[in-house]
Image: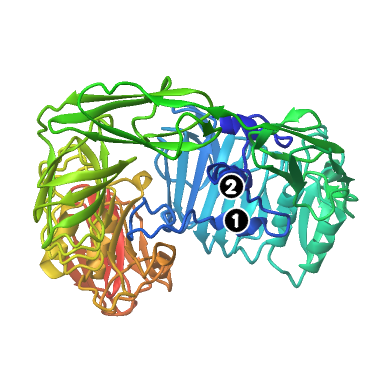
Amino acid sequence: MELYNQFKNLRPQPKGVLGRSTLYLMLLLCLGQLLGGALLIPTRAHAEDYAGLAGNEEIRSISDEYPDDLPMTEDKTIKMTFHRAAGEQIVLDISGTEGEFVVEGVLEDAPYTGRRTYTLTEDKVVIRGDITALDCKGNNLSTLEAIGGDQLIRIDCSGNQLKSLVIVNQSALTHLFCQRNYLLELEIVNSPNLQRIDCYENWIRGDFMTNLIRHLPARSTPGVLLAVNSLSPLPDKENTCFKNDVVLARSLGWIVKDYLAGENNGDGVPYAGNDPIYFPVTIAPTEHGRVWIDNPDPSRIQKDDAVVVHTEAEQGYELSELTANGKDIKRYPVFYISEPTRVEATFKLAGIYSVSLLPIEGKGEVFIEGAEDLTRVPAQTQLKVKCKPALGYRLSAVYAGNENITRICSFAVNEDTEVRVVFQEAQPYEDYIEIGRAFTGPLNLTIGQNMATVMPEVQGGKIREVHYDQMIIDAEENVIRISAMIEKFACPSVQANSLNVTHARLLIDLNCAQNDLDRLDLSGNQLLTKLSCEGNKLSQLDFTNCPKLRFVNVCRNQIAGNDMDRLISSLPVRTAEDQAQLIVVDESFPNEGNECLSEQVARAKAKGWQVYNYNGGEQDAQLYVGGENKNTRSVNSLSEGRLRCYPNPTGSDVTIEGAAPNTLIQLISPTGAAIYSGRTNLDGEARVYLVDFPAGEYILRIGKEVRVIIKR
């Protein structure tokens, strides 16, 4: 929260608004702090290059972290968040074919077409399927995300409180009206048919306006961008569009216009753009260090651009003060320029402090590393406290002064500091994990505990080193037992040939990827949420006792046929909001032994799971359809051609149109049983009756096509 409060005042913006590019900037600054002050800030020319910031280069297993970069959002999905609570009402005007889409998050049922008042069941609404137009203006919207679609032509979300608007892969979209909101930026990606955008009376300025224009689709006939309203009743709440932005827009076939309070019947008038405003930055002389900025010409920096201040102290000195026009920027040395600015820095002699170890409480050994002489430690030196409990004891607490550092066992020296370490007699654990290998020796593990203040108990080996949740164990036997209240356990690429987690009742996150496991029993892991077991020799998996599971990576194993059927059947039912993911194959891997057919994929989808082909890496992962040819296609490809199945959801029957004549039709129950078969007529049409079947999700197979039908 402190970091947020520092940054939300860097540039003029409404309270609580923080754009994505600003968040990238925050992330980069945080990394800079961790890296000892080295800062990386996106410039006007390269801001978009940081959107895919990838973190460190540490080699990890396929699923060492939650794979947030997978394509989580389904195609043909519009997600909206409101500043309204459950029970309050909104008004939506939706154009489309009834039965081709559904509205979630409201009390009312279909029909959904036309202008209707809806009652919220929560603060989020999702529209899934094909619509041609959406009018949601004046509803206190805070976010809107429209991902994928080939029918949506027009969006009007004006007059809300939007802080985030994302438009991606809308191939038919021609008109976007998002004026009178609180947008700091507007993200439009791969929407090639856009011809008019109204975005005046927002907060899109500087680099953010330039990036918006840079990503507009090139047009052969003029497109219209109503970027400003020079007669706005709130002149401080308005975009800025400079002359060079207008020139850039013109080169892409766009006319930038001024709304001018509705002039020309609301179409505005051509806008030449503002003359860029430049301000100088002056760096005051200083001693015992140097100060600089990256901008090529400090005397001429465009208004609203970010200015990053770098400092370097001489040996034996440290930065004491850093200000921009008197404002303290020492902690976060960046500002958005809005006036001539003077940067001043003061360096002082670096402090020398004493670090001492108080008498150890309990039994164990303690070592403090990071300085040769603990009686003379320079300021900001990072020290590590290594603790080895004696047999029968566990680490209970580590303090540096009054700060509890038990989880990290390290601290930066900023004053004379006393280190206190407490060991407690160990009580026997009931929870444990056993891991086996064909050899002994060092074993690198990640162990996250419910009680991080105590050390795990190890049988068959000794703990050599602990840092955060990373642990090195010297295994003295082929199978070792680790007893603790384990919530997270990671042992990727350690050549394990056995793993027993049935007694780890608190286990939430398990990563045993890239080993030699041919068996994995999860019957005792009812809290398990994430499983990464790719790259093993598994032929079976059963998730029956894992009701909280929402991420599974099983690619590069040997699961096929009936065993894959049983795996799919044992998956817990998830909702769309869970965004459950099943990575089932890696078609880039030549020895992939898993097989998942299209009907198996469809059954997983019917249970709320997105199914993926890993395709060699998280960045390249694709939604997987399966089927006889086992090709990976986008979910959109299921909807190509003329095939239609409606209404869906249904209470009685489903009509099929657009199929080939005499095509085999099969209806498959939620348990996987075929409960109806038939064929289309000579016109490629058929009707399937579900009136006698219970409510639920059914698989409708029409030749090689698959649809999920919801029976109410």
Q: Is residue 182 left or right of residue 354?
A: right
- Identify residue for label 1: 50
Look at 69% across and 42% down and name the residue there: 314
Residue 510 appears at what percent x and percent y?
24, 49
Q: Which quadrant of the figure contains the N terminus? A: top right
- Asked if disc 1 and disc 2 are in contact, CB closer than 8 Å, the reply is yes
Helix, strand or loop status at disc 2: helix
Q: Amino acid at mark 1?
A: Tyr
Residue 300 appears at what percent x and percent y?
87, 50
Against 184, residue 139 (above or below) is: above
User: Which is more toward the observer, 113 or 328?
Assistant: 328
Residue 693 in sight from this viewpoint: no
Q: Is residue 188 left or right of residue 593?
A: right
Q: Is residue 23 left or right of residue 382?
A: right
- Identify residue for label 2: 28
User: Which is more toward the observer, 391 or 444?
Assistant: 391
Q: Is residue 680 left or right of residue 290?
A: left
Q: Amino acid at mark 2?
A: Leu
User: Which is more toward the observer, 711 or 426?
Assistant: 426
Q: Which image quadrant for residue 291?
A: top right
Look at 63% across and 48% down and name the residue there: 39
Residue 439 appears at what percent x and percent y?
12, 61
> Gap between marks 1 and 2, in whole Å?
9 Å
Image depth: mark 1 or mark 2 in front: 2
Helix, strand or loop status at disc 1: helix
Against 198, residue 13 (above or below) is: above
